[in-house]
Image: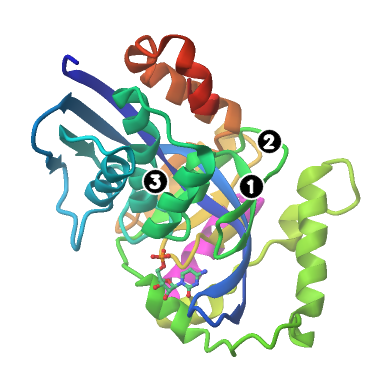
């Protein structure tokens, strides 16, 4: 097969709400969250060619510390499909790293989504999700995008109705919050098997929030029920993040929260005009912070962007396209 080149988007996510319940026997924490993709994205260019020997390489617009999830994702797909290939990646990073926006996870998921289509060999959806989870707890979400309820480690996913393309402003301060440390700081007790009584009311609140997202005309205003369990510990370590949250609210935010374990703080706004005015003022007042304007990204747009970017590879699939699910 000839060389094939595509450029795919790896969208960032927010946690519209995030509860950390007990610590499980596998060392991970039981989560209750609502994931939401946003339009902010990294761009990943992929060149693929079958070869006698596998060679993977990556160029990136910024240095990525530690082992690269894109390479690990590519190795997983090649092993799964028993294919040898030369694959070159070029990553244009726009999502701040270590910022609770899932950038590294999304890059990995983008690799898992694109490579099978480029290789002309489908991987079953459940298998792809299992490979994704081996790479990280929030990687499976990025295989679907949109608005989704996340349970378990975050891999048990249920699609929710799409929220409108709400304007968003992100406060990106460059502070790095290590995820494992943020979980450890919460000092959660091991699970006893039943929902601990201390979590009971919080679970009710979470259910009301989900009901509010599912049914916008219901009495529960989901934004007023949003919370993030990392805020107390992370804000006490980095008090400036609490300030950013307050600034976003003071400048007209409907809701402002830490995303994931931080450090990005996001604000949701009623209109793009209010958000843009807030962005201008905040850029003047706090030029030490990068204020990034974006919007919530509904699933249909997530999918449209993916299908468009994979068009050159999809053309080659022919009648087998149906094996690839929504992407083909
Ligand atoms: O799965 P991921 O690699 O993103 O997780 C990073 C770290 O965050 C894990 O090693 C674990 O310490 C913590 N974590 C957790 N419970 C989760 C997700 C992550 O304790 N549900």
Q: CA distance from mark 1 to mark 3?
A: 15 Å
Q: Earlier in the sequence, mark 2 or mark 3?
A: 3
Mark 3 burial class by Cα count in 10 Å: few <14, some 14-19, many 20+: many
The residues colored magenta run 239-255
Quadrant where ligand 1 appears = bottom left
Badge 1 marks a residue whose secondary structure is strand
Relative to 28, residue 145 above or below: above
**Residue shown at 60% from the left, 72% from the top:** 30
Q: CA distance from mark 2 to mark 3?
A: 20 Å
**Quadrant in the picture for the N terminus:** top left
Q: CA distance from mark 1 to mark 2?
A: 9 Å
Q: Is residue 134 left or right of residue 300?
A: left
Q: Which residue is mark 3?
A: 106
State yes or no: residue 241 in magenta: yes
Mark 2 burial class by Cα count in 10 Å: few <14, some 14-19, many 20+: some
Q: Which residue is mark 2?
A: 162
57 or 281, which lies in front?
Answer: 57
Q: Earlier in the sequence, mark 1 or mark 3?
A: 3
* Mark 1 vs 2: CB contact within 8 A: no
Image x and y of residue 113, in percent:
40, 35
Q: Is residue 150 visible?
A: yes
Q: Is residue 84 left or right of residue 6?
A: left
Q: Quadrant of residue 19?
A: bottom right
Badge 2 marks a residue whose secondary structure is loop
Badge 3 marks a residue whose secondary structure is helix
Residue 233 marker:
none
271 or 37, which lies in front?
Answer: 37
Q: Nearer the viewer, mark 2 or mark 3?
A: 3
Q: Which residue is mark 1?
A: 148
């Amino acid at each position: 097969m000839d060389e094939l080149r595509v450029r795919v988007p790896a969208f960032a996510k927010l946690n519209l709400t995030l509860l950390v319940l007990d610590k499980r026997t596998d060392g991970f924490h039981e989560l209750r969250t609502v994931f939401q993709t946003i339009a902010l994205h990294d761009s990943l260019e992929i060149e693929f060619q079958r070869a006698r020997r596998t060679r993977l390489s990556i160029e990136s617009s910024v240095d990525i510390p530690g082992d690269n999830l894109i390479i690990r994702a590519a190795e997983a797909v090649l092993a799964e499909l028993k294919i040898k290939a030369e694959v070159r990646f070029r990553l244009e990073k726009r999502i701040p790293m270590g910022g609770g926006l899932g950038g590294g996870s999304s890059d990995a998921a983008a690799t898992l989504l694109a490579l099978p289509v480029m290789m002309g060999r489908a991987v079953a959806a459940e298998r792809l999700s299992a490979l994704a989870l081996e790479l990280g707890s929030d990687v499976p979400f990025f295989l679907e995008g949109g608005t989704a309820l996340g349970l378990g480690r975050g891999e048990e996913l249920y699609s929710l109705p799409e929220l409108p393309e709400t304007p968003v402003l992100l406060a990106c301060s460059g502070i790095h919050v290590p995820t494992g440390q943020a979980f450890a700081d919460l000092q959660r007790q091991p699970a006893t098997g039943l929902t601990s009584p201390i979590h009971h009311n919080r679970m009710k609140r979470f259910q009301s929030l989900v009901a509010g997202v599912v049914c916008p005309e219901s009495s529960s205003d989901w934004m007023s029920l949003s919370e993030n369990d990392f805020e107390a510990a992370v804000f006490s370590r980095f008090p400036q993040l609490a300030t950013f949250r307050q600034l976003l609210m003071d400048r007209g935010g409907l809701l402002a929260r830490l995303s994931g374990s931080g450090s990005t703080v996001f604000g949701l706004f009623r209109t793009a005009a209010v958000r843009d005015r807030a962005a201008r003022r905040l850029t003047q007042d706090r030029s030490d912070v990068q204020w990034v304007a974006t919007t919530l990204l509904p699933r249909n747009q997530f999918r449209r962007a993916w299908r468009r970017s994979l068009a050159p590879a999809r053309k080659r699939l022919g009648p087998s396209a149906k094996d690839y699910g929504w992407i083909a």
